[in-house]
Amino acid sequence: MDNKVDPSLFPHLAAGLALDPVDEALPGGGLQRLELAIQRASEGLTRWQAGCFEQVSNVPLTGAEITLLLLIGSGGRAKTIKELARSTNRIDIPNIQYSLRKLASAGLTSKQGAGRSGVTYSLTADGEQVSQQMRGVRQRLLVQMLDGRSELARQLDRAAESLEELAELYSTATRLAEAKSEA
């Protein structure tokens, strides 16, 4: 068995891209293949969000800022920076704060409270309208494509569970790597 990626699996990649021999022992092309698929899905999601957002607003936002906006609007209650960071698996609090200021300057969010633990963020009326319009575009363009594809819906649920577990493994591996680099 050679260690080349099947070009039919990744038509946008060079056919000669090699997998690490360690990954070959894992089913379906291994961890490297999965990581590349996650990266590609992430980039696709970012483009998708930006495309949808451009349909409902002229505010220039990044994918990460759109994600924060949608998270703030979910669940029917205001969110803290800590909750937003945990939900997105981010540790770059200053960048999250910058994004939150940008969303507030655009009139999409508002900040309540004071102090380190008493600050929460919620959507303004404009933010709620944009968020609802985003959900409508998503429903019209993406969710409808899943109608009648119940097996795919089940696979997506299982994939989400697996990715949550993988995120935990990455966190553990990161802590181990950081501990070794400090030793």
Image (cartoon, grey):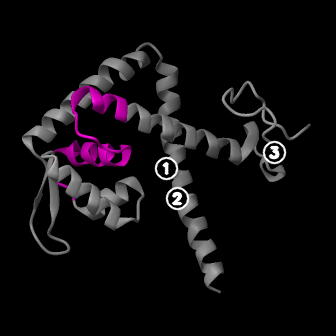
Which amino acid type corresponds to the residue marked 1 in the rendered image? Glu
Disc ID at residue 50: none
Which amino acid type corresponds to the residue marked 3 in the rendered image? Glu
**Residue plotted at (46% across, 26% down):** 153
- How far apart are the two marked residues, 2 and 3, measured between alpha carbons? 23 Å
Disc ID at residue 24: 3
Is 72 one of the magenta-colored residues? yes
Mark nearer the viewer, 3 or 1:
3
Secondary structure beneath dot 2 equals helix
Residue 20 percent across, percent down from the top left? 80, 50
**Residue plotted at (70% across, 28% down):** 9
Which amino acid type corresponds to the residue marked 2 in the rendered image? Glu
Residue 82 percent across, percent down from the top left? 29, 64
As drawn, 65 above or below 111: above
Tell me where the magenta segment starts and ends, as one range. 50-79
Residue 144 percent across, percent down from the top left? 36, 16
**Residue plotted at (69% across, 41% down):** 33
Residue beneath disc 1: 164
Is 75 one of the magenta-colored residues? yes
Residue beneath disc 2: 168
- Looking at the image, do the residues carrying marks 1 and 2 touch, with CB atoms under 8 Å apart? yes
Looking at the rendered image, the quarter that the N terminus falls into is top right
Secondary structure beneath dot 1 equals helix
> Is 98 or 155 nearer to us in this picture?
98
Q: Earlier in the sequence, mark 3 or mark 1?
A: 3
Q: Earlier in the sequence, mark 2 or mark 3?
A: 3
